[in-house]
Image (cartoon, rainbow, N blue to C red):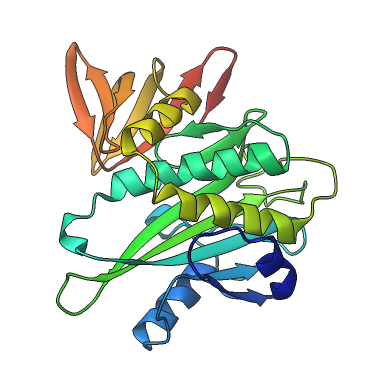
């Protein structure tokens, strides 16, 4: 990855600093280190060729091999953290990433709630949005991370049946990084209802039978909608319930299953 090239492709209305790495433990982890050290004064992006300790939701490892993927974190200053609706940001960033991939690579991905991107029935990206408040719990930063599987890789056995890639073609990863950042920054100026409409259009979940792990419970039902604040609305035994946490552990769709 080349910092100068990424900066040349950026088209953001705010000044965005960029740092690139050949190898890093995790772009999200590094972002939080910078915030804790007081080294972040404005929007900033960290972009890496490889992660040695990439992670996703619930701290699960995210396989991040060199050269075949793209690992990126946007640090975004946020005021009034106490009113933050994480679900809205997470769903919005998923839409932004999907639209960036459509523009840059020409693929249309679907979204598994909350924030996994799928293409050709395989997971090709994971998104993790973390909030880092200041000591008063008011102003702080959003740490917005994405791991992309661009080209095929030799995936470990435990994910080989579910992980996929976006393309077999060579991709200009510097330009892709800039396009993702352009769309991520743009998200914060968009109308929230329009973003959620776009999210629903790309949803792989709405209308489908789902099995969810929510705490120690297993919930089975039919996904009916995604609420305006990012919650998953599920018909459970004839009653609609909205979930803001949890994970879909099984999603049955026509002809294939995501799990």
* Residue 214 seen anywhere in this rendered image of the structure: yes
The mark total stands at 0
The foreground one among 221 and 22 is 22
Could you tell me residue 159's position as x and y percent?
Answer: 61, 45
Above/below status of 232 relative to 239: below
Residue at x-position 50% and y-position 27%: 202
The foreground one among 79 and 173 is 79
For the view shown, which residue lies furthest in the right direction?
Answer: 169
Q: Quadrant of residue 91?
A: top left
Could you tell me residue 196's position as x and y percent?
Answer: 37, 32
* Residue 26 seen anywhere in this rendered image of the structure: no
Above/below status of 58 relative to 229: below
* 153 lies left or right of 194: right
User: Which image quarter is the N terminus in?
Assistant: bottom right
Residue at x-position 40% and y-position 35%: 195
Residue at x-position 35% and y-position 48%: 89
Could you tell me residue 191's position as x and y percent?
Answer: 35, 39
* 255 lies left or right of 213: right
Residue at x-position 33% and y-position 38%: 192
Above/below status of 226 relative to 139: above
Could you tell me residue 186's position as x and y percent?
Answer: 47, 50
For the view shown, which residue lies furthest in the front direction?
Answer: 13
The foreground one among 234 and 183 is 183
* 55 lies left or right of 41: right
* 152 lies left or right of 190: right
């Amino acid at each position: 990855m080349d910092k100068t090239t990424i900066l040349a492709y950026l088209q953001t209305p705010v000044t965005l600093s960029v740092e690139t790495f050949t190898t890093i433990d995790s772009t999200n982890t590094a972002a939080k280190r910078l915030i804790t050290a007081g080294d972040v004064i404005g929007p900033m992006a960290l972009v890496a060729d490889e992660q040695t300790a990439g992670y996703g939701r619930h701290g699960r490892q995210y396989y991040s091999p060199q050269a075949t993927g793209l690992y990126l974190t946007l640090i975004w200053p946020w005021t009034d953290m106490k009113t933050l609706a994480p679900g809205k940001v997470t769903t919005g960033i998923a839409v932004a990433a999907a639209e960036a991939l459509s523009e840059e690579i020409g693929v249309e991905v679907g979204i598994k709630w909350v924030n996994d991107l799928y293409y050709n029935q395989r997971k090709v990206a994971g998104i993790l949005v973390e909030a880092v408040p200041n000591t008063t719990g008011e102003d702080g930063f959003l740490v917005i991370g994405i791991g992309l599987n661009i080209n095929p890789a030799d995936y470990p056995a435990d994910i080989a049946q579910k992980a996929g890639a976006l393309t077999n073609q060579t991709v200009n990863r510097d330009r892709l990084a800039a396009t993702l950042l352009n769309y991520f920054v743009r998200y914060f100026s968009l109308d929230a209802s329009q973003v959620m409409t776009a999210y629903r259009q790309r949803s792989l979940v709405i209308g489908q039978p789902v099995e969810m792990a929510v705490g120690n419970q297993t919930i089975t039902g039919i996904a009916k909608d995604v609420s305006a604040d990012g919650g998953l609305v599920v018909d459970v035994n004839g009653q609609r319930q909205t979930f803001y946490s949890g994970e879909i552990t099984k999603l049955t769709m026509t002809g294939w299953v995501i799990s």
